[in-house]
């Protein structure tokens, strides 16, 4: 009888464990370029550093993986206003691409346009191998953390940590999360209305339970905050503050387990259930 109890305990324990949510913290672009004194400083951007470091230390046991993204641009990147004559910072232009995702330039009339992408023009920022592009020395980067670079294709911008803005190429972010068994992500960093927003949208689209941590991000344009949060909520992204992370992560894990057990209970032929019963009666 004791042996049977032990077997059932481990079957149930392993079964429940396998459906626990596994969480990653994504820290978007907390680099010198986006901080005070940087080439594209986000207003109050430095305030996110303490919030994010606090999330790391406070929820250390709940966060299985931390991924930093790093904006990493060619010196002549297409998103820089300096590359477009007659244009200035923050102008919005239309970029055109052919079916291979190659930029159509005005001096190539043979280029057949397949995609149109609206592009905000930025000051030159986060250029590859510069001090400006380094992740802030005040961020707590630890052993086992992963850095994912983006924006290094010179002819297309990349707000999301997963894909460039045209969806022509992807980073290693999704592979890294999948390899680590991650099911939910906490998205933080800079800037709220661009890279944090796009990273959150793509994470949700890829099936991750996504938490947009409002007090761990700051916008380029304050006027965008309302629309960004409304859009994320409409897509099923949770918009929360860092003080509530513990409640949400635990609640979410419990809900996932509950859903699975309920679903499994309705499937009498569930392989796991059969194996458990078989083991139980054969000992
Ligand atoms: Zn950039």
Image (tube, helix red, strand yellow):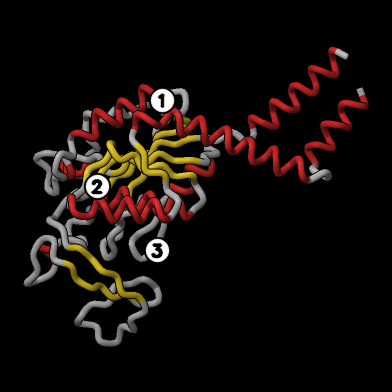
**18 up-or-down from 99: above or below:** above
At a point 92% along the width and 27% down the height, the residue shown is 281
Q: Earlier in the sequence, mark 2 or mark 3?
A: 3
Q: Quadrant of the C terminus?
A: top right
Furthest toward the bottom, the residue is 110
Please indicate, yes or no, whether residue 147 appears anywhere in the rendered image. Answer: no
Q: Which residue in the structure is indicated by mark 3? A: 167
For residue 30, side relative to residue 238 (left or right): left
- Residue 103's spot in the image, x, y percent? 29, 73
At a point 35% along the width and 77% down the height, the residue shown is 98
For residue 125, side relative to residue 7 (left or right): left
Give the quarter of the image for residue 188: top left
- Residue 215's spot in the image, x, y percent? 27, 36
Q: Which residue in the structure is indicated by mark 1? A: 59
Please indicate, yes or no, whether residue 17 appears anywhere in the rendered image. Answer: yes
Tell me the element at label 3. loop
């Amino acid at each position: 009888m004791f042996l049977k109890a032990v077997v059932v305990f481990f079957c149930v324990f392993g079964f429940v464990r396998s459906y626990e949510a596994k969480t990653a913290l994504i820290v978007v672009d907390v680099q010198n370029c986006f901080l005070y004194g940087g080439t594209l400083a986000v207003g109050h951007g430095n305030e996110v550093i303490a919030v994010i470091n606090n999330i790391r230390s406070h929820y250390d046991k709940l966060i299985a993986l931390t991924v930093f993204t790093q904006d990493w641009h060619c010196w002549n990147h297409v998103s820089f206003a300096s590359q477009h004559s007659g244009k200035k910072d923050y102008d919005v232009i239309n970029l055109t691409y052919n079916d291979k995702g190659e930029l159509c330039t005005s001096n190539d009339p043979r280029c057949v346009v397949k995609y149109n992408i609206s592009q905000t023009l930025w000051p030159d920022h986060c250029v590859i191998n510069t001090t400006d592009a380094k992740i802030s020395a005040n961020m707590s980067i630890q052993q086992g953390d992963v850095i994912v670079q983006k924006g290094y294709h010179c002819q297309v911008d990349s707000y999301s940590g997963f894909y460039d803005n045209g969806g022509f190429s992807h980073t290693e972010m999704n592979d890294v999360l999948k390899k680590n068994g991650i099911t939910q992500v906490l998205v933080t960093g800079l800037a709220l209305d661009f890279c944090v927003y796009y990273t959150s949208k793509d994470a949700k689209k890829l099936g991750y339970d996504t938490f947009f941590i409002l007090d761990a991000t700051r916008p380029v344009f304050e006027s965008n905050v309302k629309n960004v949060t409304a859009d994320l909520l409409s897509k099923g992204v949770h918009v929360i503050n860092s003080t509530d992370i513990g409640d949400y992560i635990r609640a979410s894990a419990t809900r996932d387990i509950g859903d699975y057990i309920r679903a499994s209970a309705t499937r009498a032929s569930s392989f796991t259930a059969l194996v458990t019963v078989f083991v139980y009666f054969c000992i």
